[in-house]
Amino acid sequence: MIRFKRRNIVWLAALAIMTAIGLAGAASLSANVIALQFMLIAVFALATVASTVEIGRERETLIDALRRAPIRNRVSPDAREAIDRAKGRGGYENADLMMLDVGLIAVQSSIEGMAMRRTRSISKDDDGVRPFIALNVEPSEAERHATIRFEIYNQFGEEKFVHEMRAYLREGEMNIMTDHHLPLAGNRDITGAGDWDLRVYVDGNLLGMHNFNLSPSMTERQRRLAAEQDVDMGVYNIVDEVEQEVTPRLQDLLQSQRDNQQNGNDSRLSDSDVRSDTASDTGVTRRRRSRTTTRRRR
């Protein structure tokens, strides 16, 4: 888009008057009249273009667009969808602070350990979920503190999770994850299933809206199936949903292994004692039998 400098119109008007006077004076000359008039017109045309059309900013914008093209290619499909949804809700897109990725990290613990996975579909079988974003920070937005705010809304539009944190922005790509998680397993405040929303704000401006799905736990599904189809309750092992036990520590696992080994050694010792006692009893019996046989022969 071409921009005009209106502040130079007065100067151009004065230059036009001077050019007209020069053309009238050149007409009285007999030699090289056409060449002199052409030169005056060319100078006026160049001055008009240079004084009215501004091309410096457009050139800078084109260079920035070419430089940021590789960065835009690294934007994930989830982030691109979240940015488009945020624009529809009045969000803004800052080229110097671009969101490259957005999502959720679900955490589930068991006896085997803790499992963390990136997902767009969570359930109440998970222990909790933590949102995160990845930003590309340009030098103009770097070396400062920014307020990052995460909000999670349920299928009814109710706010279920809010986490606001201060992050120090550094030049380049950086990942930001919440310090706390939204508890799921055993959380009776979260019911039902449906589409949820994650909204991310940077310095009070909506940066992206990420959509994900929440499904009930296996216990809730079995209970709902039994209620809807009038199934015998004894067929399913339905228990109240409680939080899972804490994952055993490494010291506890090693101690239990030592105890099992000690118990195994004790059992082996007891078996060897029994065998030795049996062997001694067998030897005594054999001696008694040999003595009895000798007496009978005599």
Image (cartoon, rainbow, N blue to C red):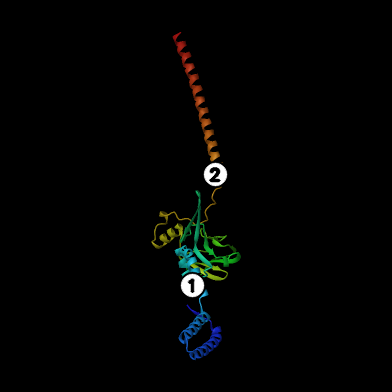
Closer to the camera in the image, 276 or 206: 206
At numbered mark 1, what does the secondary structure look like: helix, strand or loop? Answer: helix
Most extreme residue toward the top, as rendered?
Answer: 298
Total marks shown come to: 2
Label 1 or label 2, whichever comes before in sequence order: 1
At numbered mark 2, what does the secondary structure look like: helix, strand or loop? Answer: helix
Q: Which mark is residue 224?
A: none
In the figure, 63 relative to 187: above or below?
below
Q: Where is residue 217 drawn, in percent x and y?
A: 46, 59
Q: Where is residue 36 drawn, in percent x and y?
A: 49, 85
Q: Where is residue 61 drawn, in percent x and y?
A: 50, 71
Residue 224 in view here: yes
Q: Which mark is residue 253?
A: 2
How busy is the neighbourhood of tag 2: few (under 14 within 10 Å), some, or many (20 plus)?
A: few
In the figure, 245 relative to 47: above or below?
above
Please say if the residues under marks 1 and 2 sit with CB atoms less than 8 Å apart. no
**Residue drawn at 46 percent across, 11 percent down:** 294
Residue 212 in view here: no
Disc 2 marks which amino acid? Leu
**Residue drawn at 46 percent across, 66 percent down:** 80
**Residue drawn at 50 percent across, 76 percent down:** 55
How busy is the neighbourhood of tag 1: few (under 14 within 10 Å), some, or many (20 plus)?
A: some
How far apart marks 1 and 2 lie (CA) works out to 52 Å
User: In this rendering, which labeled residue sits more in front, label 1 or label 2?
Assistant: 1
Closer to the camera in the image, 139 or 135: 139
Closer to the camera in the image, 184 or 38: 38
**Residue drawn at 49 percent across, 25 percent down:** 278
Q: Where is residue 292 drawn, in percent x and y?
A: 47, 14
Closer to the camera in the image, 166 or 237: 166
Q: Which mark is residue 87?
A: 1
Disc 1 marks which amino acid? Lys
